[in-house]
């Protein structure tokens, strides 16, 4: 699925400054709108409203939800963890 340019932009900033690895496949990602807030994110789920609402809006259509936090994890893994594997 396509991800909006704005989401990619936010995700890149978060990957650089806002991701803390808790354990394998569990990360804490800062909210881009409220720096005091953060979300727990795995490779396919996020706690944020955007992610939850995606499934409410698109339920049963076989689409995968996305949000800037999930995308940030993908970028973070690709950029900072790819040479560890
Ligand atoms: Zn999210």
Image (cartoon, helix red, strand yellow):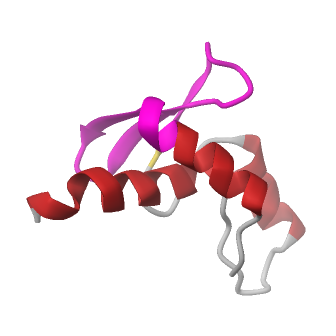
Q: In what quadrant of the picture does the N terminus appear?
A: bottom right
Residue at the far top in the pictured view: 36
Q: In what quadrant of the picture does the C terminus appear?
A: bottom left
Residue 52 seen from this side = no
Identify the residue at image location x=30%, y=37%: 21
Q: Position of residue 57 (x, y in %)?
A: 89, 66
In the image, 78 versus 22, the foreground residue is: 78
Residue at the far left in the pictured view: 84
Q: Is residue 26 part of the magenta span, yes or no?
A: yes
Q: Which residues are magenta?
A: 14-40
Identify the residue at image location x=44%, y=57%: 75
Residue 81 seen from this side = yes
Image vertical order of residue 76 relative to residue 14, above or below: below
Identify the residue at image location x=71%, y=86%: 62
Q: Position of residue 82 (x, y in %)?
A: 22, 63
Image vertical order of residue 52 relative to residue 29, above or below: below
Q: Is residue 84 part of the magenta span, yes or no?
A: no
Identify the residue at image location x=77%, y=64%: 4
Q: Position of residue 51 (x, y in %)?
A: 70, 54
């Amino acid at each position: 699925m396509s991800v909006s340019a704005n989401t990619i932009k936010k995700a890149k900033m978060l990957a650089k400054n806002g991701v803390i690895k808790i354990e394998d496949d569990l990360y804490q990602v800062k909210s881009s709108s409220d720096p005091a807030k953060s979300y727990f994110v795995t490779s396919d789920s996020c706690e944020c409203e955007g992610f939850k609402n995606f499934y409410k809006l698109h339920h049963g259509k076989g689409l995968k939800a996305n949000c800037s936090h999930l995308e940030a994890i993908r970028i973070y893994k690709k950029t900072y963890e790819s040479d560890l594997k």
